[in-house]
Amino acid sequence: MGSSSAPLPPVEMFFFPFVGGGHQIPMVDIARVFAAHGASSTILAAPSSAPVFQRSIDGDQKSGRTIRVHTFQLHEDAVSLDTDTSAAPSTDTSALLEPLRELLIERKPNCIVVDSFHRWSAEVIDATGVLRIVFNGNGCFSRCSFEMLDAHKPHEGLDSEYEPFVIPGLPHKIEMTRSQLPHFHKAPPDGGNQPSGHRRGRPNNNHFGVVVNSFYDLEPQYVDCFRNVMGNRAWLVGPVSLFNRNVEDKAVRGKASSVDEQTCLDWLDAKGPGSVLYVSFGSLARLSSRQLHELAHGLEASGQNFVWVIGKVSGSEGNGEISADGDWLPDGFEERMGETEQGLLIRGWAPQLLILEHPSVGGFMTHCGWNSTLEGVSSGLPMVTFPISAEQFFNEKFIVDVLGIGVKSGSVEWSSWSWRNEVIEPVGREKVEAAVRKLMGGGVEAEEMRRKAKEVKEMARRAINQGGTSYADADSLIRELQNRNGD
Ligand code: UDP
């Protein structure tokens, strides 16, 4: 990919990702996209993240693109900003405040694209006069849904957590229950204010605009709503995962894989086209051991091949990663899966893009994180939806009710990503089995989902290539920054 117009004076763009896979991974890809469009991209990193970011851009640097990592020098007693800390989404990154201020004053970039979870950063950036562009990791559908909930409050005054209500003001009929809403979105029982740490950030004031990892044709009515009704200047430059075109890019994305890539690809090569379900719940969610048991039984009973990334478990120590010796899986499950070759279990981190794009993979059981949703869409896969936290229940509605490419698992209980513990009733094995059979079993409905998913995949590819909307949006932001440069 390269810029479509004549050589332009360089535009200096900074990118300031938050901690956690779902935020860092797309931001790094966005920085790479802009570098490919001719900008000079600098990714700002705490020391703990810098090596991972550097690995992701090695190839771009070798091919002559102007992209680098700037590592903040932190005092030894600064908070850990590691992706794997047990409290990633609420991590306080304000230790970076002074280093950021100094850097912006010294370098005066044309803009900084900043993750909205750095809640302290707007004031600091605005005081330096550097243009602030916000990234929050979500798509337009969920943002419009939240906006309409805030405006109309259809979820208030209901008798039960499970009584369905329709979100007013949306182009599709979207039905939800209170149980699926983030806790910080429900009125507190005493009518008082919730602690500010739990409030959904609205850092949209005074910023120059918003960069979104999505593409126009995926959610046209919601993009229009986000721009015209909610009043956002938005550049949609995704799906940015598609920018990872070769095996090396895909393999080094995020963290080092816990499984040898070749082992994984060999396992998939031995299966028939479209016959494998890929199961993953993203980089943060912790499932209870009860839920893991139900999933294991359901997957096994479905008779379908699967690759299951068993990431984190609630109740385990440290960063939540599942250990080999815990009682996380049914007796003999792992051995049986090895013998029958029905399932490949990956403990830890999987090369998700490599797996999703393998021809043997025919479906994706996902927690509906926005990146995973887009990656599923970009790979042309129908999905079993299993939302857990954040805005994932909205993404589920989008996949199932708007795109028509998903089967719900039956997960209806929102929980904080860190405590999907024993309190929450797990989705039972029968539901898991039924959803998997419906998606992978080859019925008429599933075939229709498969057809639609392939259509969306083609749209995604068109969007990021020359002549596509995402390509044009990336160019247009650079041009705009350039013009301001010349003022
Ligand atoms: N991911 C991965 N391997 C894993 C787990 C996650 O590569 O084993 C990547 C995945 O491809 C996606 C990101 O991590 O890009 C997860 O982001 P998402 O928004 O789906 O979920 P979150 O982790 O924020 O809940």
Image (spheres, rainbow, N blue to C red):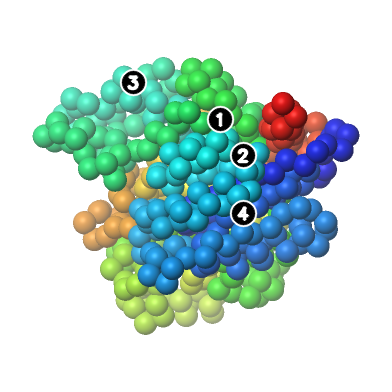
Q: Nearer the viewer, mark 2 or mark 4?
A: 2
At a point 81% along the width and 45% down the height, the residue shown is: 1
Location of residue 90 in the rendering, given as x and y in whole percent from the top left corner? 35, 53
Residue 151 numbered mark, or none? 3
- Whether the residues at callouts 3 and 4 have beta carbons within 8 Å, the answer is no
- Alpha-carbon distance for marks 1 and 2? 9 Å
What is the CA distance from the residue labelled 1 to the residue labelled 4?
19 Å
Closer to the chain start, of discs 1 and 3, is 3
Number of the label disc, if any, that sits on residue 111: 2
Q: Is residue 166 visible?
A: no
**Residue ID at (11%, 34%):** 190
What percent of the width, then of the height, locates residue 70? 61, 59
- In the picture of the structure, the residue carrying the numbered disc 1 is 208
Residue that badge 4 annotates: 43
Residue at image position (69%, 73%) is 262
Sequence-first tag of 1 and 2: 2
Disc 1 vs disc 2: Cβ atoms closer than 8 Å? Answer: yes
Q: Secondary structure at mark 4?
A: strand
Which corner quadrant holds the C terminus?
Answer: top right
- Residue 424 vertical placement versus 231 (above, below): below
Q: Residues within 10 Å of mark 4 (few under 14, many from 20)?
A: many
Q: Earlier in the sequence, mark 3 or mark 2?
A: 2
What distance separates the C-alpha of mark 3 from that of mark 4?
Answer: 36 Å
